[in-house]
Amino acid sequence: MTQDRGSDAPPMTARQRLIVVLLLGANFMLSADFSILNVALPEVGQAVGLKVSEFPWVATSFALPAAGLSLLFGRLGDLYGLRRMLLIGIALLAASSLLGGIATEPVLLLSARALQGVATAMTGPAALALLITAFADERQRARALGLNGALLSGGFTFGALVGGMLVDVLSWRWAFFINVPIALIILAVTPFVIPAAHSRDDVPLDIPGAVSGTLGLVAIVFGFTEQSLAALAVGVALLGLFLWIERRASAPLVAIEMLAWPSVRWGNVAVLTIFSMEAGLIYLVTIYLQEVLHLGPFATGLVFGVPGLASVVAGIFAGRIVARRGARSVLLVALLVQGGFTAPLILLGSDTSSMWLLIPALFVGFFGHITAVVAATVAATSEVPDAGKGLASGLMTTSQRVASTIGIPALAAVMAVRADLLGGIHVALAVDVLLTVIAVALIAAGLKQRRSAAKG
């Protein structure tokens, strides 16, 4: 960067502030949507007639399209307009949330969740790309991304808290209905704040790449969720076909040369690590609180208010830290903090005195988590031209969604290797720490080679 990292970023204009509020509001809603039904699952399942063994599909039916279609819709946003894609996605989210709120049987509920996942795949990459392109100054961009990172995890915490509250006070249906008024506000304000971009109808969409890439991602996520080796094998084969197609397509869905950039490649490896390990950690802590300490859903949500507070604090400072110290060094340190403060949780016991260990570790670990999210976002997108921001953010959003989906079943499978629940949680936490440390070493080596090549 040519600017002084130690100097403060210039103030945002009134229009930029409004864009930040609008887009962060959209991303916050999407993040909350991912978790808001988790603590309400027994109530939802009983209301619509789902069996206990079918409960995971409430999350999976959302996660499959959210992860599998992010890359496709990120590219469509580049071609046909990011604002247009944002508006279509928000409108679909409002409609699907209304559908979910009135569902009385499993097919309608799961269909609504799947449509919410499609809406998330449309909206997430577009909102992130619009946020990135709203700031030419990288220090301003880093601060905006800091707030975005805070709200992504803050939305997850908010979803857990509100899910418990809505079930206790009103009904599980409001876990869906709450999206509708927020979406309508965003739809009303966006056309007056965000300018429309020209469509690029002259560029054909890479249909074979879109089909193979999307189906490959869906198969990978399904394989991890259902622990199906056959689905994983199909997913790997389809992604191999996708890469083969992209190298030969005249207008590829993914520019292979961009994926070859170390900053993009290692930024996405970091995103995969950050979100998969933290999603798995949240799942393990939830099991610990409810099945080992026997806390209720609402009390569990209150405990997760601690990382929510850390998200707010990190959101204030992370962007400034990245702007002053650089994305690479901050990313490595922050990811080590995330993994390092997971390590003490291996000592959690079977009584509530362990809360004195759990709560501080969650706070510091989540501060590292959000800071790592901001640094990885900057690393994965800062060198990409504006014309490819939608694709770059689509790649990163896809990595985030896939990671958030596979982290839980992966660590849950590790947890199952021990007969006693607490012992299994300890083993899974140890694997979380080990994988994080390995990822840090690989990312450090990859980004160091990039810097050496740049100097040469």
Image (cartoon, helix red, strand yellow):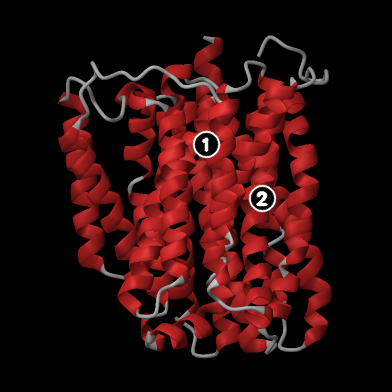
Tag 1 or tag 2, which sits nearer the N-term? 1
Compared with 50, 413 (above or below) is above
Q: Position of residue 30 (x, y in %)?
A: 54, 52
Q: Which mark is residue 369?
A: 2
Q: Residue at x 76, y 89 (%)?
A: 351
Checking the image for residue 270, the label placed there is none
Q: Nearer the viewer, residue 9 or 108?
A: 108
Which mark's residue is nearer the viewer, 2 or 1?
1
Which one is nearer the viewer's eye here, 260 or 238?
238
Label 2 sits on what residue type? His
- State the residue position of label 1: 127
Distance, label 2 to label 1, CA atoms, is: 21 Å
Circle 2 residues within 10 Å: few <14, some 14–19, many ≥20: many
Left or right, residue 437 beside residue 250: right
SS at circle 2: helix
Rendering quarter of residue 291: bottom right
Residue 206 is situated, as x and y percent measured from the top left of the image, at 20, 30
Coordinates of residue 423 in the picture (x, y in percent): 58, 83
Q: Position of residue 38 (x, y in %)?
A: 54, 72
